[in-house]
Image: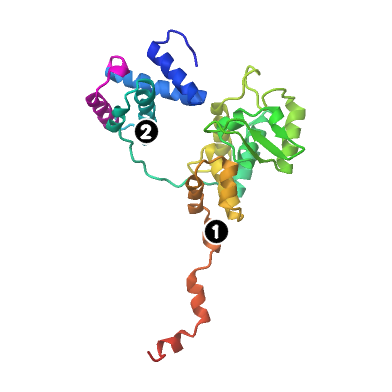
Amino acid sequence: MTHEKMSPLRERMIEDMRIHGMGDKAQKAHIRAVKHFAGFLKRSPDTATPDDLRAYQLHMTDTEVTPPTFNARIMALRFLFGTTCDRKGMKRYMQFCTQPRRLPTVLSIEEVAEVIAAAPGPGLKYRAALSISYGAGLRASEVCSLKVSDIDSDRMLIHVDEGKGGKDRKVMLSPDLLDLLRDYWREAQPAGWLFPGKPKINPISARQLSRAFNSAKHVVGISKPATLHTLRHSFATHLLEANIDVRVIQVLLGHAKLSTTARYTHVATKIIRDTPSPFEALKKLDIENLRHRPG
């Protein structure tokens, strides 16, 4: 976070977020949300009244702000008033927007293979990055933050440093993925960041990675509304379809709640297809005799 020309309120809020262990990305999102509220209010946000909060929420509704953005701004304001301003009573005037639970888009194993093969060049950089996104079920930010030292070829593990929620975790490293990463390393010789950006002292950005995925998706001709995050969704779904316990998948994905992982059961169509209906048990019975059996 930059500290140039910072108001005392913003500085205190940043300090509070740091104390709470909030990551840099989340801090920036909270500051951006509070800045938006201040722009609507046209004065310092800590002077807001319950009526101001109500007017702001109506404004967001009228301007068709998406539910995720609406809720992210409310989260930031709840932190501002509840923690930084010590006005916890203001929370009762802020309501989250109910958003429809959409099932995640999932690519088939064949589609994943096609996308990875179509990753743009030159070299293996983007192919390796997309492969690790799918092969280890990593978020875009986690792929970008990987260091060469995070690849543990002795134990066949990948160390994910401070994923979402600031929690480290270990994920599997498949032999085929390791072979690809070694080919990439011999080609590019990365020293610090596994996937360096420009300049090399910085990691590749999530935006660059998304552009590479979209380019590959376009080349392959996939019409599904797939994004880079779809590779992570596909990783989870394919594991579930391979009968891996959902609690193991929860650990691999770094989900705090099992309910978050459980939504993949709704898109694991192979499991649905292969699950026998209880109707099949009826053929084992002599239905005609049952119908005429004395009561």
Q: Which secondary structure lies at badge 1?
A: helix
Q: Is 286 located above or below residue 188 in the figure?
A: below
Q: Residue 16 placed where, x, y %? A: 44, 21
Q: Residue 295 placed where, x, y %? A: 37, 89
Instruction: Kindly indicate the quadrant of the structure image that contains residue 135.
Output: top right
Instruction: Kindly indicate the quadrant of the structure image that contains residue 191.
Output: top right
Q: Residues within 10 Å of mark 1 (few under 14, many from 20)?
A: some
Q: Name the residue under label 2.
A: 71
Q: Which mark is residue 279?
A: none
Amino acid of disc 2: Asn
Please name whichever residue, 91 or 224, is drawn nearer the observer in this view of the structure. 91
The stretch in magenta equals 42-62
Residue at position x 55%, y 28% in the image? 206
Q: Mark 1 points at which residue?
A: 271
Residue at the top extreme, as displayed: 5
Please name whichever residue, 64 or 151, is drawn nearer the observer in this view of the structure. 151
Please name whichever residue, 283 or 44, is drawn nearer the observer in this view of the structure. 44
Residue at position x 39%, y 11% in the image? 8
Amino acid of disc 1: Ile
